[in-house]
Image (spheres, rainbow, N blue to C red):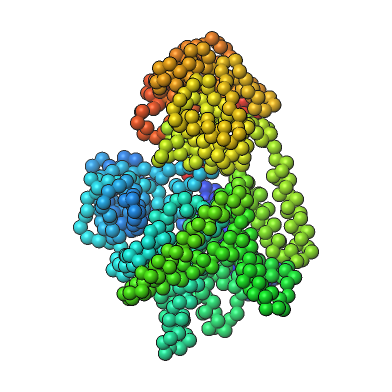
Amino acid sequence: MAFINRHHALITAVCFASGLAAAFHFLRFLNERLILFVFFVLLAALFAAYRFRLKIFYGLALLVFFWAGLVLGFNHFSCFARDHLIFQPWSKASGFSGWISSAEYKKNGQNRYVLQCETIRIDSLEKAATGKILLWQKEGNFRLKYGQRIFINSSLSLPPLPGNPGEFNFRRYLNFKGIFFQCHITSEQIQILPGHKGSVFQRFVLIPLQNRIRHVIQANIPQPTSHLAQALILGERQNLDRELYQQFQKTGVVHVLAISGLHVGFVLLLFILLFGMLPVSYRQKYTLAFFFLALFVALVNFKAPVVRASLMAVLYFTLNELQRRPSSLNILGLAALIILLFDPDQLFQPGFQFSFAAVGGILFGYPHLKRMVPFNPERSVAKKLNRWILQPAMVSLAAVLATTPLTWWYYGTIQTGAVLINLFIIPAMGTIVTLSLMLVLLGLTGVPIVQGLGLLIHFIFGFVKKSIAFLAAWPFVQIHTGHPSLIIVLLTALIVFYLYQAHSRSARLKVLLFVSLLVLFTAFKTEKHLRVTFINVGQGDASLIQLPHGAAMLIDGGEKRPWLNAGERYVAPLLRYFAVRRLKYAIATHAHTDHFGGLMTVLQNFTVDTVVVSPYADRTKSYLQFLALAKQKGIPVKQVRRGDRLFPAENVRCYILHPYGDFTLAQKRNGSEVNNSSLVVKLCYGETSFLFTGDAQKEVEQTLGAYHDFLKSSVLKAGHHGSVTSTTEPFLSLVLPEFSVISVGKKNKFKHPSPVVLSRLKSTHIPALRTDRLGAIVFESDGQKIRLINWRNGLN
């Protein structure tokens, strides 16, 4: 209660944010007139409580702010202009016009733009329309510029939903930015229209200044450090090396690659020092510094952490001038309230959440952590140790603890190495930021020593890059735990809150209580169902089977090519999302890379008990590398054929129905022969079963007819990606599945699945579930019946 009484602004912001969150999640249940009526009733009650000095005044005030968030959220999330694109028959559009409101250029020419729509063409008629459209430039040497008016001869599509459980929800991310449609464009589809639109200040001041800063950076700092400097100064991360970004992410210090409050501190300090040299008053010095800080905020496109830090700085200075001494947490709450009033969507952006959580953790947690350390530095060495090691470590710990629930929720990881790594990475990156700011300021004035400064930045970053690559290889810097439930995240947040106050006995007891509950929710959670996930790996096959009581096995792993490693991109993230660390079996149905290729990543990054392969002796280089990798890792390789069985778990039976005889012999070594050497696996759990056919073609299906009724299965994985060479009518009449799954890539060059196969499935009333349209296909079985899981429910 004492905490609440001391931090009114923070609690008010939390109540307002809770109202916004409630509006978003319960939007379909809200009635506009009813919530407005309740809001005015609450206002009247608040006025009466104030007038008669009732004790419930503060509680009513918080309820009013919650309801204000609910009202604002309802209007923001549900009210669109009548001519907005979402109300148009957009699927029939053949063209649209508008102006470029945002441009993001990439070094490979695959630029991105946001277009503010003005008109849409439907059935040769143009009509007014509003809304934002994301434009993807495939390739080319053209660049669209801010304010340009254009007409595009193309259709619209919805942004993609996640292809697999746990993947980034790009559609929701764009929706929170007010973007509901996208379009891939080429130069031939674009017609430049006369005139310009947009902000004159942005066109003639901000963008030229951004271009000039880019030129200074690129001319004076070698690559790839110049891309880092652009990320640190302008917030442009699109050209950062992906492997480097992943290494920073793994070590838990990816935040230093983004524009943050740290940058605001350096920028503000730099301007205060510069204007301190002028014969101006204290107030004038800070006013000038804040003016240029506002310019910096605009230059980085109003990134949430920068806006937050800038608002806090301005509020702190203003309140000091008014001779008020508010707590830092109240200033943080006031900054959040102002941001959410102007942009409610920010509440659902990870950047906003991480920024406020980290700063809140430092402001609240650091003083408490300091009290818990029985350290009284009297000697000079101890003082230096306290100042340069212990205190920064406690600040880092406070921030890492505060963001742990968010990191766990969004990434399914616990960053165990971040506290110590921050001790050297933040000073190093702080030095790079300071030097980069100096380089930009000097470069804009034409000072000749700038190039030497650029080489110094490049040298420092080279050291940072090698250090991060070294640390990222350590196994303990990041722990993959799988995606937690909301209740587990909330328990973790409570543990962190009371852990900060562990100097108090009551807080320690609460930590013990919540840790006990956390253990109960995690350690004793047993899964009694069998879950099969047909992973969306594009043009290829991969199926994860999660067995009752925690074991798992994998059938195929998707493609591996120089431009796509399905194991790295799709399979490994899914295994981590489901907290699968060990596979009892990794089965490669046959020797085509779109089936076994991704398994190589799995062997390198997960514990695999046994690799199961077809006895067909394929001699391709990639397949031999796969077998050699298994041998190198000490994983037994087991060849199986018709009549063999696998024993993945109690009550789960796994029968090998194919290959046998000549199908195991490498004679012609052509595609059909390799396809027909596929392992055909029947997985049975209770009265339910799944039939996995690899790329087996009709010749194999004919021989499988010898199994008669044993072929009957609940789910059939259609052979060869739905090719006409498989899934024949006689075979379907024996299997009689409730569902069929076709694992296939969008717009693949083979034109899979075949219309003939789709027609066969339709005529036999078997639903054809396609990964190119539905993403991953997930089934659960309790041993009695099969249930199709709509894992995308609520994601769109």
User: Is residue 413 left or right of 759 when viewed as pictured?
Assistant: right
- Residue 261 visible at all: no
Residue beneath the point at 51% across and 79% down: 318
Q: From what the image shows, is residue 731 above or below residue 296?
A: above
Q: Position of residue 354 (x, y in %)?
A: 55, 59
Relative to residue 750, is residue 63 depicted above or below? below
Is 507 placed left or right of 673 in the picture?
A: right
What percent of the width, then of the height, locates residue 103?
Answer: 34, 57
User: Is residue 648 shown to the viewer in this render?
Assistant: yes
- Residue 539 placement: quadrant: top left
Q: Which of 513 and 387 is in front in this view?
A: 387
Q: Is residue 99 left or right of residue 482?
A: left
Q: Position of residue 457 (x, y in %)?
A: 43, 66
Tally the marks: 0
| Residue at (60% x, 15% y) in the render | 643
Residue at (48, 41) in percent of width and height: 569
Q: Where is residue 533 in the image (x, y as percent from the top left)?
A: 55, 33
- Which corner quadrant of the image does residue 421 belong to? bottom right
User: Which of 181/41 is in front?
Assistant: 181
Q: Which quadrant of the rendered structure holds the N terminus?
A: bottom right
**Nearest the camera: 188 or 460?**
460
Q: Which residue is drawn at 53% across and 58% down?
A: 467
